[in-house]
Amino acid sequence: MDKALENIMILLQRRYNFLREIGRLTDELAEATERRDTVSASLLLEMRGEQMERHAACEGELRRQTEEEVSLRRKLYAIALGPISQADGWTEGVSPAQAAMIQKIREIRVRTQSLIEQIRAKDSMLARRVRHR
């Protein structure tokens, strides 16, 4: 289980990094839209789309990772992709080292969820601005 948790942690961190880049590109897209710079906006949309594809591929790899070990499938899925509100139950029956990794995974997931909410809010504002022009 140690190796599986480590791989999940790495994939979740990678996913978080893709989302940070999507957030940065979203900010730049908003600026380009404010300036009415359609060339830059088009390029930024393309770059953002590429990051979203990378994010989706990472998400797929994360799902595959949770399914590799049949005996741990349910627990790994809950840790990697299940509701964060149920995180207290993730550390039942694991070693202290595994509990520490699971805690780190939880922290990454909480940061990721916050980042997703920020990106969604930026997207909404951007969509409203574009509609009103």
Image: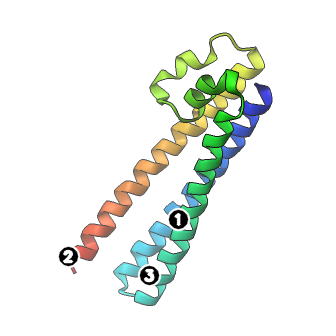
Pointer 2 with pointer 3, Cβ within 8 A: no
Dot 2 or dot 3: first in sequence order is 3
Pointer 1 with pointer 2, Cβ within 8 A: no
Which residue position is annotated with label 2? 132
**Amino acid residing under circle 3:** Ala
Which residue position is annotated with label 3? 41
Q: Position of residue 44 (x, y in %)?
A: 50, 77
* Callout 2 secondary element: loop
How many numbered marks appear?
3
Indicate the quadrant containing the N terminus: top left, top right, bottom left or bottom right.
top right
**Amino acid residing under circle 2:** His
Left-right relation of 100 to 83:
right
**64 in relation to 37, above or below:** above
Dot 1 or dot 3: first in sequence order is 1
Quadrant for residue 29, please give it. Answer: bottom left
Quadrant for residue 35, please give it. Answer: bottom left
* Callout 1 secondary element: helix
Q: Position of residue 130 (x, y in %)?
A: 28, 76
* Callout 3 secondary element: helix
Residue at x 73%, y 22% (from the top left corner): 98
**42 in relation to 8, above or below:** below
Left-right relation of 60 to 123:
right
Dot 1 or dot 2: first in sequence order is 1
Indicate the quadrant containing the C terminus: top left, top right, bottom left or bottom right.
bottom left
Left-right relation of 45 to 21:
left
Residue at x 56%, y 63% (from the top left corner): 53
